[in-house]
Image (cartoon, helix red, strand yellow):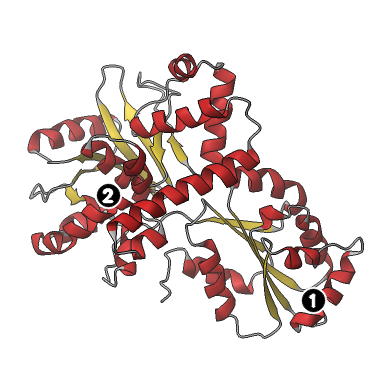
Amino acid sequence: MQFRRKIQPELEKQITTREVVVITGMRRTGKTTLMRMLFDSIKSVNKVFLDLQNILDQKLFDEIDYNNIFANLKSYGIIPTKKVYLFIDEIQFKPEVTGAVKYLYDHYDVKFFITGSSSFYLKNLFPQSLAGRKVTFELFPLFFEEFLTFNKIPLELSNNFNEKSSSKNFIEYQKLSKYYEEYIRYGGFPQVVLEKDEKQKQLMLRDIFNSYFQLDVITLADFKKIDAFKKLIFILMERVGSKLDISKLSSILGVSRDTVYSYISLLEGTYFIFLINPFTLNRDKEISGTKKVYLCDNGIVNQFSQIAKGSLLENSVFLNLKKYEAVNYYQKRSGAEIDFIVKNNNNLTALEVKTNAVENDLKKLKRLSENLSIDEYYLVSHSFSKISKSLCAYQV
């Protein structure tokens, strides 16, 4: 059974547009399944789905004269004089195909949908050959709302934080809390979510990590000290929600600061980590420039490290905030901080994540928010809270 993703409506709108559609993201997030669903939704028969992991599909593009590619596609029933829908999965296995994509886009009526696993690779590849010709969509592990969909529990959450807060109720919390506990523990990779056996979930998560390391890191990186790189991954897992200290990491790993920066760049570019910048106002004296790090999926974190439940909760909340325009954090030199400042429809909302929210937490958040001229602020609580300006963690 196939389940719809939140990104799907926007992708479906692209079917009638001219631009090349690029879907990227970490491995195992469901890009191929999503592409298949889009492919099946197109009524035209003048369409073909190619998987560039397949050497035979790769050979279709082995032409000096790109016009001959259509001759190769005749066996698929493709008629070049009519509009063609060409789906190319896993383009990173044959990156030179982008030259053919550009040529066919410029000279024929072809609508392209393309997937690739690594933004580090794709963002360096596509701007050169498809500048001004593409739109890019990023697919992440499941948001909690999608997680519920995969568990056949319909729940549509508003993007308005005030509506979320006013609509929370204890009965819904009791119903959904056990699912959120599973989500915090095993994360949102689709195949892991659909698997019911806990031991099998753990094996899948280890396989996802190993595949990432072998296919993205080893393939893309040219690092001499691969052991230091792997050590950095485990260090970052233990420091979810913490600020990056490049000098300290350099000392621990025994490599230069520049090398650490290159490691971080690869991890961020391949969607394994996410970095958020501090929220700044010139008139304040907040700590500026130091980024905070979050991991791609709680399931991965839980398999390879042991961190506090509060950090896991914060990581889970962050991953669900990625659907908004922008996410930052705030910290003054005195140490007072706000976990997240979210921009949504040009409005700013301050969010502080707590395992158990209390009134004193709200007073601190209110004071910090008002100093920043942020009118909307809420506590995000793992346990149910009756505090008026609070959200259940699953609502984010």
Position of residue 197 in the picture relative to residue 295 (left or right) = left
Tag 1: amino acid: Leu
Which amino acid, mark 2? Ile
Q: Position of residue 273 (x, y in %)?
A: 46, 39
Quadrant where the N terminus sits is bottom left
What residue do we see at 77% from left, 51% from top?
Answer: 129
Residue at numbered disc 1? 73
Disc 2: CA contacts within 10 A as few (<14), some (14-19) or many (>=20): many
Question: Residue 320: x and y, percent?
Answer: 35, 51
Q: Residue at x 46, y 46 (%)?
A: 209
Q: Is residue 125 above or below residue 167?
A: above
346 or 103, which lies in front?
103
Q: Quadrant of residue 295?
A: top left
* Residue 18, x across and y down, in percent: 69, 68
Upstream in the sequence, badge 2 or badge 1?
1
- Tag of residue 162: none
At x 68% / y 43%, what residue is drawn? 124
* Apparent side of residue 2 relative to residue 157 in the rendered image (left or right): right
Q: Residue, x 42% and y 55% (percent of image)?
A: 141
Q: Is residue 275 above or below residue 123?
A: above
Disc 1 crowd rating (10 Å Cα; few below 14, some 14-19, many 20+) is some
In the rendered image, the vertical position of residue 188 relative to residue 254, given as above or below: below
Secondary structure of the residue carrying numbered label 2: helix
Residue 232 visible somewhere in the drawing: yes
Up/down of 235 relative to 386, above or below: above
Image mark for residue 184: 2
Looking at this rendering, what residue extends furthest in the right direction? 65
Q: Picture coordinates of residue 114 (x, y %)?
A: 64, 62
